[in-house]
Amino acid sequence: MKKYTGKGIYGAVAMGKIAIFHKEKTDAQPGLAAETSVEKARLAEALTEAGKQLREVYDRALREVGEADARIFEVHRMLLEDVDYVGLIENTIESQRVNAEYAVTAAADRYAEMFAAMEDADMRARAADVRDISDRLIANLRGEGIRRQESAEKVILCAADLSPSETISLDRENILALVTAHGSVNSHSAILARGMQIPAVVGVGEDFLAEVAEGSRAIVDGYEGEILVDPDLETCNTYADRQRAAGERKRLLQQLRGKENITVDGREVRVLANIGDIRDIVAALQNDAGGIGLFRSESLYLESRDYPAEERQFAVYKQALESMGGRKVIIRTLDIGADKQADYFGLKKEENPALGCRAIRICLARPELFKTQLRALYRASAYGDLGILFPMITGVAELEKVLDICREVREELDARNVPYSPDVELGIMIETPAAALISDRLAPMVDFFSVGTNDLIQYTLACDRQNPDVQAFVDPYHEAILRLIRMSADNARRHGTRIGICGELAADTNLTETFLRMGIDELSVSPAFVLEVRDKVRSLDLSQ
Ligand code: PEP
Ligand code: MG
């Protein structure tokens, strides 16, 4: 038995035979163009064909993995229409008098190099997207089309890397698990694989593909990010037990749907869902979330090419409130900046973006932008139970400004007789050490606190959450973090302010009891963890 280690993308276990995915070789050799006009016409045809294919792939992805993950194929299609990209290919044909295949490869190299040199990990991942499109164009120019993986038996599919098009074109009925030698957890392929809900491991290294043989038996452990090739009988039995237990656990958790969410000693705790996109509401409802504890509204801005209009925002917020049928929906105002960038904001490049202009700082610097979002939120409040949450608060004066702007927005709506709920609750993220340390001053100013442990950890332990090299220094159980949360909870209680946790730590069931004993009222977690946390809450007796 040989063990290989990478990064787990989706937590589940699979056992079966390995099948190696061989990429079509699409590198084009320079060939002289007999007629540049002929090459350009061939290119135009290949582009049209690729557009059609991508529309089909998008539809398929939409059905299989949902709109959020399918969107990458729309991005690919947009690149096909990008005048700079297509112009570069045409110019290469014209100026170098080469065939279309070679010009496409040259353009892909230029673009991929440009993306690969970027600092932002998401932008670097775009290099793979450009290669994907170029492979598609070259296959079309050669009349090959994009090959689909067909297999009679369910297999563990192993590849050097998988482009998003390849991932989505896989026949998921025949795939037990996915393993790639390269790739990062944030690549679009990884996201798509996660959406397919099959065990997946990326970055197992070159050796793996060199050593592993087609047809070998293997176990893929998506929890630990491990591949065990040629496992012995005892290991197989251990993993078979784990698989059975995981399936049984899932079934059991489903039985909690509709049940009360109280501890053994009768304390009611709300377990809500975090969503990044309106489409995630489906998963929140499927897992019977008590409401939405964090709607990261920046998704609306990140998916647009320009500032989303008030009407568009209003429609999305209204839909969220209506879909949750009267359950609480907490929508966080724009938290853009740092790792979340949209070109049209024209934000300056910063040396330390996590400590720079982000979130509420941008909103206060651009009050019209902020007021547009607040108007949309207040108008939507007439359709449900809304809480508005402000990110990255560090001080009293800053919060006063925020509350003044909210007041102005309400007065303007009153003057125009626009209806809104009088019961909208206002809250702040406790995600900076400063906010936790002055939580006694902030608590009387708002209705609720929501602890953002992701940023609280980054700022308290001085570990950039984007930097994989410092993750070894991150101890989420660090006493400093727990003290700051406890301090915030104590101050919240003294002033009758509700307090919840919406950072990733809220889903850590090793801490549920600690949090509840601190007086935390709500836990907001990814939809997939809602039932697990509810189960934990129901098992606790806090009377002892
Ligand atoms: C947090 O910081 O914990 C949080 C919930 O916000 P985000 O992860 O969106 O920064
Ligand atoms: Mg945060």
Image (cartoon, rainbow, N blue to C red):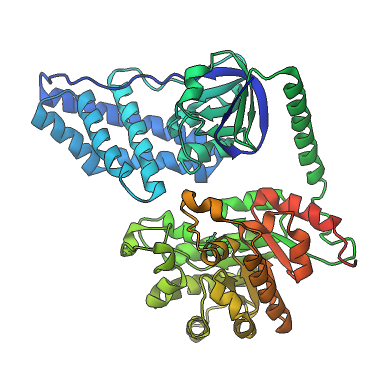
Which residue is depicted at the point 20% across and 29% down? 103
User: Along the horizontal axis of the image, is 345 left or right of 508?
Assistant: left
User: Along the horizontal axis of the image, is 156 left or right of 22?
Assistant: right
Q: Which of the 4 image quadrants contains residue 132?
A: top left
Q: Quadrant of the N terminus?
A: top right
Which residue is depicted at the point 46% across and 35% down? 183
* Count of picture labels: 0
Q: Quadrant of the C terminus?
A: bottom right
Q: Please name whichever residue, 13 or 171, is drawn nearer the observer in this view of the structure.
A: 13
How far across and down, in percent of the image, does residue 408 sit?
A: 48, 85
Q: Please name whichever residue, 203 or 251, is drawn nearer the observer in this view of the structure.
A: 203
Q: Compared to 36, does 477 lie above or below?
A: below
Q: Compared to 233, does 336 lie above or below?
A: below
User: Along the horizontal axis of the image, is 218 left or right of 515?
Assistant: left
User: Along the horizontal axis of the image, is 544 left or right of 424?
Assistant: right
Camera sees residue 393: yes
Q: Please name whichever residue, 384 or 126, is drawn nearer the observer in this view of the structure.
A: 126
Which residue is depicted at the point 21% across and 25% down? 102
Q: Compared to 301, does 378 lie above or below?
A: below
How far across and down, in percent of the image, does residue 84 sit?
A: 21, 43
How far across and down, in percent of the image, does residue 113 sit?
A: 28, 39
Camera sees residue 427: no
How far across and down, in percent of the image, does residue 301 sit?
A: 43, 60
